[in-house]
Image: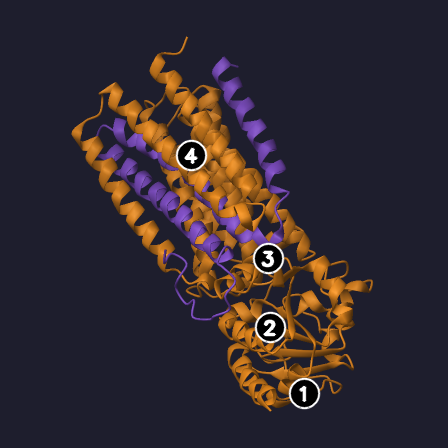
Chain colours: A orange, B purple
C-alpha cells in the first residue's frame, strides 16, 4: 500500500499528465489552443507544487538545498520569461532551439548527478544503468546540437553547411565511442572516466550533427532535437523513478517525431537525407546567380500597383524570404489597403513556409491577419483558378510546377498551384535558386513577372503605387 | 525485471502512443505554437531538478543540481510564456491595424 502522501502525490502527477495530453489535444484549433496551453501550464504548476510538498513533508532538506533550489528557480524563471516576452516572432525558431538546449542540459545534469551518487566501482542494475546512459547521451547531444542550431538560426554561426575533411570518419569514431559507453555503463562497474567519456562523446556528436546542416533544413533538426529532449527527460524520469517525467517526456518525444516527419515530407526529403547534410546551401546569402533566363519578364512596383488595384481576387503567397526580411507588417498593410477597397485578399500558406512549419501563420497572426484568410495548401489550391493576381513573396520551391513532373529534385513535393492563377507577380531578391538548387519554372511562365527587390522594401513601394491607383 | 521497471516501461510506451495519436491531428497552421507548447511540456524536467537539488550533499552535487534547476526553470517558464504569447496573436479580434509590433503579452 502507498502511504497517504505518496497516494496524493501520485494522483496529482496523474492529473498533471492528463492536463498535458488534453492541453496538447486542445491545441488542434486556434479557438481552444490558448486554453489548451494554459491547461498544460496548470498541470505543470500542480506537478511543481506537489514536488515541493513531498520535500517539505520529508523534512530531510538542508538549508543549502533550499537556497540552491530557490535561487536557481528565480534565475531560470526570470531569464526564461524575459526572453519569451521580448523575442521577435521571426526569431521564434532559435528560441525554441534554445529551450531544447536547456531542457536537454537539465536532463543530462540529472543523469550526471545520479550516476555520481552511485559509489565508484559498483555494479548498476539494468533498470538504472540503461536509462541513465541514454539520458546522458541524448541529453548531451541535444544540448550541444541545439546550441549550434540556435547559433545558426540567429546568424551567430554561418547558416551554411559546415563540413571538413574527415568529418565522416570522426562521426563514425564518436558513434563507436557512444556505443562503447553504453556497453561499459550497462555491463561494467561505474567509474568517473566512463562518465566523462560519455559526456564528451554526446557533446561532440551533437556538434557534428548540427554543423553540416544548411539554414533552410535547420527547423527539421530543431524539431528532431525537440523530440530528443522529450526522450532525454523521459529517461531522466526512469532514473529518478518519477512518472510525470516519463509521461511528459514520452509525449514530447512522440510529438517531435511526428512533426519532424511531417516537415521532412513537406520538403520532399527524408530525415536521413537532411541529417546527411551538405544539401541546403543556406539561404542567408542569396548570392545572385546571374544566369537570368532570357524569357523572364521584369516588372516595376508601378505595374504591380495597377494590377492589384484592378483585381477582384488577390492571393498572397508568402515564403521564407518574407520571414527573413521581416516584411509581415508591410504585407498586412498592403492587404488592408486592398480589402478596404473591396478586393478579396487571401494568403496561400505552404506547410513549410517561413522558418518552421506553421511559422508563417504566427507571423501573419502577429500583424492581425484574420485566421480565415490564411488558406492551407488544399484550400488555397482550389482557389487559384479564380485568382486574378498571385503575389509570391520570397517563396520559391514550394511554387515550382516542376514538382508535378518526373525526375526533378522536387518531384512529388506538395506545391501551391500558383501557375493556375490569371497573373503572377514574384517578389524576390535575385534569380538564385531555393534550397532544392533548381530553377523555378514558374518564373519563366508567360503569366509571370518578376520584381527584383528585398521583400520589405519592395512591398513598401508596391503599397505606395497601389495607393495612387486606388485613389484615382 | 522488477515490477517498478515494468510499470514505468508500460507508462512510457503508452504515453508515446498517446503522443503520436494526439499530435498527428494538428493542422500545420498550428505546428509552430504546438512545437513550442510541447517544448514547454518537456520543461517538466524542472521537477526532477528540484528533487535532486533538495537532496544534494556536497559542493559538486550542489553545483550540478543548481545547473539542473536553472536550465529546467528557463525551459518551463520560457516555454509556456512564449507559447501563450504566440497563441494570443491567433485569438486577437479581427482588426486590421499593423501597429502590433510587440503586443502579444500586453494584456
Residue drawn at (73%, 69%) of the image? A400
Kindly indicate whether the residues beneath marks 4 and 3 are on one polypeptide chain. yes
Give the CA distance from mark 3 to mark 1.
Answer: 35 Å
Question: Horizontal placement of A423 versus A369: left or right?
Answer: right
How far across and how far down the image is residue A342, in percent? 63, 76
Closer to the N terminus: mark 2 or mark 3? 3
The answer to whether the residues at label 4 and label 2 have Cβ atoms under 8 Å apart is: no
Label 3 chain ID: A
> Is A315 located above or below residue A208 in the figure?
below
The residue to which callout 2 is attached is A394
Closer to the N terminus: mark 4 or mark 3? 4
The answer to whether the residues at label 3 and label 1 have Cβ atoms under 8 Å apart is: no
Q: Nearer the viewer, residue A184 or B86?
A: B86
The residue to which callout 1 is attached is A298
Q: Nearer the viewer, mark 4 or mark 1?
A: 4
The residue to which callout 3 is attached is A277
Image quadrant containing the C terminus of chain A: bottom right
The residue to which callout 4 is attached is A43
Q: Nearer the viewer, mark 3 or mark 1?
A: 1
Amino acid at each position: 500500500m502507498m502511504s497517504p502522501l505518496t497516494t496524493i502525490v501520485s494522483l496529482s502527477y496523474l492529473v498533471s499528465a492528463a492536463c498535458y495530453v488534453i492541453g496538447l489535444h486542445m491545441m488542434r484549433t486556434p479557438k481552444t489552443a490558448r486554453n489548451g496551453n494554459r491547461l498544460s501550464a496548470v498541470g505543470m504548476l500542480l506537478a511543481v507544487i506537489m514536488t515541493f510538498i513531498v520535500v517539505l513533508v520529508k523534512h530531510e532538506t538542508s538549508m543549502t538545498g533550499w537556497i540552491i533550489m530557490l535561487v536557481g528557480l528565480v534565475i531560470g524563471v526570470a531569464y526564461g520569461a524575459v526572453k519569451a516576452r521580448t523575442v521577435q516572432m521571426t526569431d521564434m525558431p532559435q528560441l525554441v532551439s534554445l529551450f531544447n538546449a536547456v531542457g536537454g542540459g537539465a536532463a543530462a545534469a540529472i543523469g550526471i548527478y545520479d550516476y555520481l551518487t552511485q559509489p565508484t566501482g559498483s555494479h548498476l542494475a539494468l533498470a538504472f544503468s540503461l536509462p541513465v546512459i541514454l539520458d546522458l547521451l541524448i541529453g548531451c547531444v541535444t544540448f550541444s546540437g541545439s546550441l549550434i542550431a540556435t547559433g545558426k538560426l540567429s546568424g551567430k554561426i554561418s547558416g551554411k553547411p559546415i563540413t571538413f575533411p574527415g568529418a565522416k570518419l570522426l562521426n563514425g569514431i564518436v558513434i563507436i565511442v557512444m556505443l562503447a559507453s553504453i556497453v561499459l555503463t550497462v555491463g561494467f562497474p561505474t567509474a568517473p572516466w566512463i562518465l566523462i567519456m560519455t559526456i564528451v562523446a554526446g557533446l561532440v556528436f551533437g556538434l557534428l550533427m548540427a554543423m553540416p546542416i544548411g539554414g533552410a533544413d535547420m527547423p527539421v533538426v530543431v524539431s528532431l532535437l525537440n523530440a530528443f529532449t522529450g526522450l532525454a527527460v523521459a529517461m531522466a524520469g526512469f532514473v529518478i523513478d518519477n512518472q510525470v517525467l516519463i509521461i511528459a517526456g514520452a509525449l514530447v518525444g512522440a510529438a517531435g517525431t511526428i512533426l519532424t516527419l511531417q516537415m521532412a515530407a513537406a520538403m520532399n526529403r527524408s530525415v536521413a537525407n537532411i541529417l546527411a547534410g551538405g544539401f541546403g546551401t543556406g539561404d542567408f546569402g542569396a548570392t545572385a546567380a546571374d544566369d537570368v533566363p532570357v524569357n523572364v519578364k521584369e516588372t516595376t512596383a508601378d505595374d504591380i500597383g495597377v494590377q492589384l488595384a484592378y483585381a477582384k481576387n488577390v492571393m498572397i503567397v508568402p515564403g521564407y524570404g518574407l520571414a527573413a526580411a521581416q516584411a509581415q507588417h508591410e504585407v498586412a498593410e498592403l492587404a488592408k489597403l486592398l480589402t478596404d477597397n473591396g478586393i478579396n485578399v487571401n494568403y496561400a500558406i505552404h506547410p513549410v513556409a517561413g522558418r518552421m512549419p506553421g511559422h508563417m501563420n504566427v507571423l501573419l497572426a502577429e500583424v492581425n491577419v484574420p485566421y480565415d484568410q490564411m488558406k492551407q495548401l488544399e484550400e488555397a489550391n482550389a482557389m487559384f483558378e479564380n485568382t486574378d493576381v498571385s503575389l509570391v513573396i520570397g517563396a520559391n520551391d514550394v511554387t515550382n510546377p516542376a514538382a508535378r513532373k518526373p525526375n526533378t529534385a522536387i518531384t512529388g513535393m506538395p506545391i501551391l498551384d500558383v501557375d493556375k492563377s490569371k497573373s503572377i507577380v514574384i517578389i524576390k531578391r535575385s534569380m538564385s535558386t531555393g534550397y532544392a538548387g533548381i530553377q523555378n519554372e514558374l518564373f519563366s511562365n508567360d503569366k509571370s513577372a518578376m520584381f527584383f527587390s528585398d521583400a520589405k522594401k519592395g512591398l513598401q513601394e508596391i503599397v505606395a503605387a497601389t495607393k495612387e491607383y486606388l485613389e484615382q | 525485471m522488477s515490477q517498478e521497471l515494468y510499470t514505468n516501461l508500460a507508462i512510457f510506451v503508452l504515453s508515446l502512443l498517446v503522443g503520436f495519436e494526439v499530435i498527428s491531428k494538428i493542422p500545420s497552421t498550428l505546428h509552430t505554437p504546438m512545437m513550442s507548447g510541447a517544448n514547454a511540456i518537456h520543461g517538466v524536467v524542472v521537477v526532477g531538478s528540484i528533487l535532486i537539488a533538495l537532496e544534494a550533499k556536497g559542493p559538486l552535487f550542489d553545483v550540478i543540481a543548481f545547473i539542473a534547476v536553472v536550465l529546467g526553470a528557463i525551459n518551463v517558464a520560457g516555454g509556456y510564456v512564449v507559447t501563450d504569447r504566440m497563441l494570443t496573436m491567433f485569438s486577437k479580434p479581427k482588426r486590421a491595424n499593423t501597429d502590433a509590433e510587440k503586443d502579444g503579452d500586453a494584456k
